Amino acid sequence: MSFRDNLQYLRAQRNFTQERLAMLLGVSRQAISKWESGKAYPEMDKLLMICDLFGCTLDDLVLGDVRTPQSLAGVTSEQVDGTVSADCSEAGHDAFNDPTSAVASNNPAAERSASYGLSPNLSVGQQAVASVALPEDLTGYDAHMNSFAWKVAAGIAAIITGVAVGVLFDSEGTVSGLLARSEFLTFVCTIIGVIIGLAFLIPAGMAHSEFVRRHPFIEDFYTDDDRSRRAKELAVGVVGGIGLILLGVAVTVYGEETLGIEEGWPVSVMLLCVAAGVFCFIYFGIRYGMMNIDSYNHEAESERREREREAQGGDFYDKLTGLVCGIIMLIATVVGLWMLFTGGPIDGGGHERWLSGNGLFWLAWPIGGILCGVATCIIQIFRSFHDRDR
């Protein structure tokens, strides 16, 4: 059997879909499809992961037949039932009936079952059914996205908070005259807020990009109850955020109408309330949006294709876009210069008015830019149809 036949057989034995196998190996579904159709071949690290996942040897997977592993050649049935039962389980077969002995002999297959959250007392077939029947978050997607939501929300809120604190130090922002009036302190507070915000946002963005690169496909493990609970959390977060912003507006109105303070601490309080409200919007919004696994998979696949294009030095459509825009702007430059230096009189009444004098020559470049935008949009539409057919 060839590699693609072995892979198809192993996947069918475990009742794995291409999507689930892709998630476990950290590749896209399209990659699994190409492997099984013989259009592509996995790298060595992926081959080793497949061997570990299905409990087979590299020789059997690539050169042999996983249905009759070489490790079992010449082994009697008594040996299968006795001393070499652990080896058989490592080869991914159900030739043994004593899971306790497999665990006691430090069986790697039993360890893998435990690592996937499955009981070592189940047979391989039972483990496969259980793993398919109960989708799990094997990649840590939920924990990652929760952390990402918190960091992004905290980063934005920190930037707004820095501005809020800085308002206290402006010329009108003193609190009972106790704080020094200094535009420099206002600037410092704002910069500190921006730095703290970026300290949250940049690592969060980098970690998310790396997670998407490592896990281009996620199997949808959320239940209807999970989605219903997140929808309620989002509603509470939106209402709470709006309430906080309205509270800040009320403080500002009270300070202006009752206390006669138009700037200073009322504005600072309002900005703090806005920061808290924005935190609620972003945090609960991302937590709700992260449950759209289909959108994540689509974006991850788009980023994967973009990385492939960059690694290959760009594709045909990128080069075509640059060529078309270059020709358009070259023509626009020629037309503009011709209008500037060779424009003739358009009024025969003794007063010559040149095209350049009317300032019309500069229109060549904006028109060229608009045409470039139109051409780019058209090319991208054709690229999207091409990617969809791949």
Image: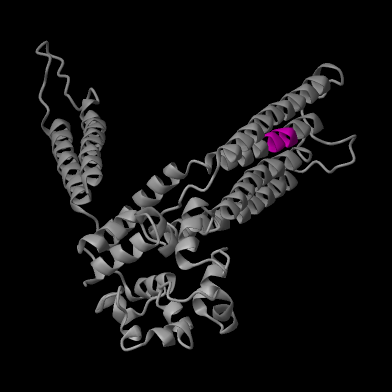
Residue 276 magenta-highlighted: yes
Q: Nearer the viewer, residue 210 or 12?
A: 12
Residue 262 in view here: no
Residue 155 magenta-highlighted: no
Task: Say above or below: 30 vs 335.
Answer: below
The span shown in magenta is: 271-277
Q: Nearer the viewer, residue 277 or 45?
A: 45
Residue pushed farthest front?
A: 78
Question: Residue 298 falls in which quadrant of the image?
Answer: top left
Residue 244 in view here: yes
Q: Looking at the picture, how far across and down is residue 107, in whole percent?
A: 52, 80
Q: Looking at the picture, how far across and down is residue 19, in whole percent?
A: 38, 53
User: What kind of colouring is applied to the model shown?
Assistant: one colour
Left or right: residue 52 compared with residue 226: left
Q: Nearer the viewer, residue 372 or 102?
A: 102
Main SS of the magenta part reads helix
Q: Residue at x 24, y 37 (%)?
A: 381
Task: Say above or below: 13 vs 234.
Answer: below
